[in-house]
Amino acid sequence: MGLGGQADQPQLGVTLDNWQVAPQLRWSFQHIDELFPTARIGRGDGPVAELGVAPIDAGALPVVLHDGSALTVADVMAQTDTDGWIVCQHGQVLAEHYPRAMAPDTRHLLMSVSKSLVGTVAGALVDAGSLDPAALLSSYVPELGASGYAGATVRHLLDMRSGIQFSEAYLDPAAEVRLLEQAIGWAPRQHPDVPGTMYEFLLTLRQKAPHGGPFDYRSGETDVLGWICEAAAGQRMPELMSRVLWSRIGAEHDADIGVDSVGSGMFDGGICATLRDLARFGTMLARGGTSLTGEQVVSPTWLADTYRGDPDSREAFAKSPTETLMPGGMYRNQFWLPYPDRDVLVCLGIHGQMVYVNPYTGVVAAKLSSWPEPQHAWKLFSTLRAFDAVSARLV
């Protein structure tokens, strides 16, 4: 099933300045724990969710792209800087390939797929009665009452609908998303006024518009959400995520999360995990919140809310200043829902990270990549269409 790969070799000259650029990023995304401080998200001591094997030639399936041209699934994977991809249905692995130097037990940086993991932790806390989506953030973290998040609720974070000022312009070194990296130590300090920890940085953010307005994709929202989850649970995120999520999906391997100088996790994009464990996570979602080991991770009620959204969620998405390229879609509970007429959940991360969940067909797919550029619409939507094509074939 394409499990082989040449032994990986460290890239020469990986530095704080260049670890996120080609050619270094292909190596660095698989060695974050060698570059930065990390904390372990333990898999626990429960059983591993065994993935069966029922191979099909998924790579040969045709994919019709947005411009009407056609490729195969394998073509799409070959043209999108893929480090590894997997397709499962009902816990059976249909295809699994590692076309470059990556192995099944390699932990790969998930970038913003991390957001969906944090959103799932929030869902588990809501189910347990520990977290109220309607509550003010300041009721969990009083310091936020003196920041730009004053008056914002947990729901505003979950759906990225606060009114906070936060630029996600990845190519702008002065954008808040890049200043945040300086605060946690993932980028050279170019601005002396940037605080030295993530939470201190979040407290400097200011409000630019009323809370509850249009969807606007901002990584800082997830970092505040992670902070709120920690406060609600009385537990730091590595232990919390292990307890309510990672130890309950039957993960085969521990995950890692990058942390700042005081141990706060980079919740918006700092988690590293294996491809197969991402498939286990997606399979749990496709099974209504129940893992392959029989553990209830989140409730069907939480997932129904994720698929349904609020009455104005799609309108808020349509009015977004973020260029989503998903007409009729929605963002809910830290997941993308790209279609107006199909229940498909997607987790996305820059440089080509994706988890795809189609609960109707039971198809779950995941792809880990090292695109040279942070964002690339053709690569993203071609991958989405490839997984749609496999899902349609398996109805």
Image (cartoon, grey):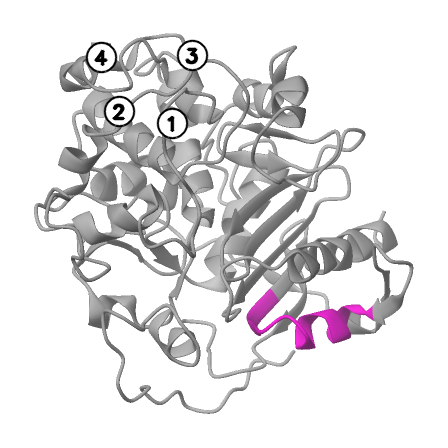
Residue 83: horizontal and vertical position, in percent?
53, 73
Residue 327 included in the magenta stretch of the image: no
The vertical placement of 281 against 203, above or below, is below
Q: Type of residue at label 1?
A: Ala
Q: CA distance from mark 2 to mark 3?
A: 20 Å
Q: Is residue 259 visible?
A: no
Q: Residue at x 12, y 46 (%)?
A: 263
Per the rendered image, the range of residues in magenta is 72-85
What residue would you read off at disc 3?
210
Q: Secondary structure at mark 2?
A: helix
Upstream in sequence: badge 1 or badge 3: 1
Q: Which mark is residue 228?
A: 2
Upstream in sequence: badge 4 or badge 1: 1
Residue 264: horizontal and vertical position, in percent?
17, 43
Front tag of 3 and 4? 3
Residue 11: horizontal and vertical position, in percent?
33, 86
Q: CA distance from mark 2 to mark 4?
A: 9 Å
Q: Secondary structure at mark 3?
A: loop
What residue would you read off at disc 1?
122
Upstream in sequence: badge 2 or badge 3: 3
Q: Type of residue at label 3?
A: Pro
Residue 74 included in the magenta stretch of the image: yes
Upstream in sequence: badge 1 or badge 2: 1
Q: Quadrant of residue 68?
A: bottom right
Upstream in sequence: badge 3 or badge 4: 4
Q: CA distance from mark 1 to mark 2?
A: 9 Å
Q: Residue at x 58, y 46 (%)?
A: 283
What residue would you read off at disc 4?
138
The vertical placement of 78 against 9, above or below, is above
